[in-house]
Amino acid sequence: DNAIKKSMPLYGKKVMVTAGPTYEAIDPVRFIGNHSSGKMGFAIADELAKLGAEVTLIAGPTAQKAAQRLKRIDVVSAREMFDACTSVFPESDITVMCAAVADYRPKQVATQKIKKRDSGLVLELEKTTDILASLGVAKKTHQILVGFALETNDEENYAKGKLEKKNLDLVVLNSLNDKGAGFKSDTNKITIFNKALERTVFDMKSKTEVAKDICTAILKIAK
Ligand code: CTP
Ligand code: CA
């Protein structure tokens, strides 16, 4: 019913969420990828939709199923994810970049399957575009931009560095030092920094509960 919808905290807000890994082709049968399951991003997209937002979920290759209420755009490579993000972002009030985007891709993609050779194989890689950083440059004052930082060491400093360098409103630190946190697990342990570099530390929780904590932090800064 309309009155209920309108009373939801993110009613009328457009939200964009990225999730999952990207795959960078080597040849027609091989790629470079990572172990991201997409769970965290899908959970965040779903929570934001439950708060009344109109959510577009841009997903790399993943086995996750999206709820009907989400608009899902499937992509494979970092380049495709960049294109999708660039087209959706201008209309987005709140953007959460949860995807584990490949930092490098093969410079050359072989058109035929590469045959094995006794000499081994050297692949030349080139950097992908940092999608989040490019959105940080394009960001208008009314837009909220949330990024992640996946770290193994000197975590808090790297996370705060990403917040500042990429012009973020919040950064969610995902420390791989915590057992039970990260790509393959159903739980996660996060720390959130806001623009004032104020830190909120959360306990280890299910990814659904972590998604709720992230949404609460977003609601605090959303007008
Ligand atoms: N990200 C992105 N595009 C890329 C790489 C990363 O949008 N090509 C985003 C991720 O979605 C995440 C944030 O940037 O929100 C941080 O990703 P992370 O891998 O932790 O940091 P990087 O800046 O890639 O630096 P590094 O991997 O060297 O730590
Ligand atoms: Ca990276």
Image (tube, rainbow, N blue to C red):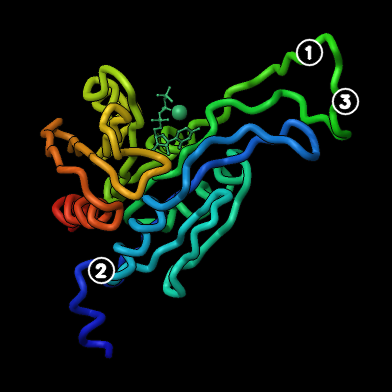
Do the residues under discs 1 and 3 have CB atoms within 8 angstroms? no
Q: Earlier in the sequence, mark 3 or mark 2?
A: 2
Q: In the drawing, does residue 178 fall left or right of residue 26?
A: left
Is label 3 or label 2 in front? 3
Position of the C terminus, as image quadrant, is bottom left
Is label 2 or label 1 in front? 1
Residue at the image point whose x is 31% and y is 38% from the top: 181
> In the rendered structure, which amino acid carries the disc numbered 1?
Gly
| Residue topped by disc 1 | 120
Nearest the eye: 103 or 170: 103
Residue 150 found in image quarter: top left
Give the quarter the ligand 2 occupies.
Answer: top left
Q: Earlier in the sequence, mark 2 or mark 1?
A: 2
Disc number at residue 105?
none
| Residue topped by disc 2 | 51
Q: In the drawing, does residue 18 fall left or right of residue 10?
A: right
Residue 219 found in image quarter: bottom left
Q: Earlier in the sequence, mark 1 or mark 3?
A: 3
> In the rendered structure, which amino acid carries the disc numbered 2?
Leu
Expressed as whole percent of the image width and height from the top left, the position of residue 28 reads 80, 39
C-alpha separation, residue under disc 1 versus residue under disc 3: 10 Å
| Residue topped by disc 3 | 115
